[in-house]
Image (cartoon, grey):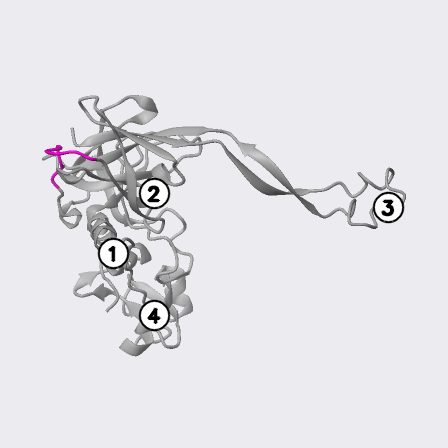
Amino acid sequence: PSVVHIKYVQNSKIKTVDVQSDPFSDFFSDPFGGFFGRGNGGTQKRQVQTPRRTATGSGVIISADGYIVTNNHVVDGADELTVTLNDNQEHSARIIGTDKTTDLALIKIDGKNLPAITIANSDDIKVGEWVLAVGNPFGFTSTVTTGIVSAKARSISGVTQSRRGGGMSVESYIQTDAAVNPGNSGGALVNLNGELVGINTAIYSNTGSYSGYSFAVPTSIVKKVVSDVRQYGAVQRGVLGISIADLTPKLAREKDITAITEGVYVGSVRDRSSAREAGLEDGDVITEINGVAVKNSAALQEQVARYRPG
């Protein structure tokens, strides 16, 4: 009952767009060949009416007074949000704050004694553990699927590519094979005690529908984002100021690194950055943050994302 259905509505709007003009459209009708600013093949301003859009997704009640966590892409650009509870009650919702970096959003409905979910520590979940995905795929409300945790701190956008710390999206997903489809976004990934361990966010698929791989934002990140949004109105994110890459066997050979086989390679350190002040140097390999092992870039991002500046 903690998982809700979210209906998204974006109203029709009149907006001005740039339209490429035909360079010959006025040449044959204008004796001056467009000399006075027409028919030059440039862009023209034109007003168009966008269609009304509707979509659906899921959300999870995290407090009895109506705070709901979901995905940013479920609510982004919405003019109206309607939340339907498990008992078919409908409520209008307002957006409290969003974070595109983690694809999370916090919305609010007016209510009392709502069935808030118990939030577990996603650090405690183990590879091989059974989990349940709860959501509203294809409009089928309160749908539950089951799967096994395949990996933690998984990135799905090419983790071997160098990226700038703090400036890119934070990808450190729990990977499972619980079936997740359109409409599941923002729903709950729970352990066998029914405790929240992640927010279902993405699938990897060539067709747009479930192909066996689904990904959830762990509660270690969800709790930080929600706390910041409620307290500050936006996420307070620490920035290291480094470019990083996974320490792959190929990279280790190129850099003549033989002592270790796992970690995050520091490609460069920006001037006047917190990393520079802390003593990090080009060519370092980060293996732990505050005693927590970081075997790849996604794990490093997850750990850094837990901290605020300072």
Q: CA separation, marks 3 and 4? A: 67 Å
Q: Residue at x 23, y 46 (%)?
A: 218
Q: Secondary structure at mark 4?
A: loop
Q: Residue 35 in the image: x percent, y percent?
A: 83, 50
The foreground one among 285 and 60 is: 60
Which tag, 2 or 1, sits closer to the chain's start? 2
| Vertical placement of residue 165 versus 270, above or below | above
The stretch of residues the image draws in magenta is: 110-118
Give the amino acid type for the residue marked by disc 1 in the picture: Tyr
Q: Secondary structure at mark 3?
A: loop
Crowding at label 2, few (<14), some or many (≥20) Cα neighbours within 10 Å?
Answer: many
Q: CA separation, marks 4 and 1? A: 42 Å
Give the amino acid type for the residue marked by disc 2 in the picture: Asn
Which tag, 4 or 1, sits closer to the chain's start? 1
Q: Given contact means CB atoms under 8 Å apart, are the residues at marks 3 and 2 in contact?
A: no
Q: Residue 76 in the image: x percent, y percent?
A: 38, 41
Give the amino acid type for the residue marked by disc 3 in the picture: Gly
Q: CA separation, marks 3 and 1? A: 58 Å
Q: Which mark is residue 33?
A: 3
Give the amino acid type for the residue marked by disc 4 in the picture: Ile
Q: Given contact means CB atoms under 8 Å apart, are the residues at marks 2 and 1 in contact?
A: no
Q: Residue at x 35, y 37 (%)?
A: 74
Which tag, 3 or 1, sits closer to the chain's start? 3
Q: Residue 229 in the image: x percent, y percent?
A: 25, 51
Q: Given contact means CB atoms under 8 Å apart, are the residues at marks 3 and 1 in contact?
A: no
Q: Which residue bears the numbered disc 2? A: 72
Is label 3 or label 4 in front?
3
Res 248 visible: yes
Q: Which residue bears the numbered disc 4? A: 257
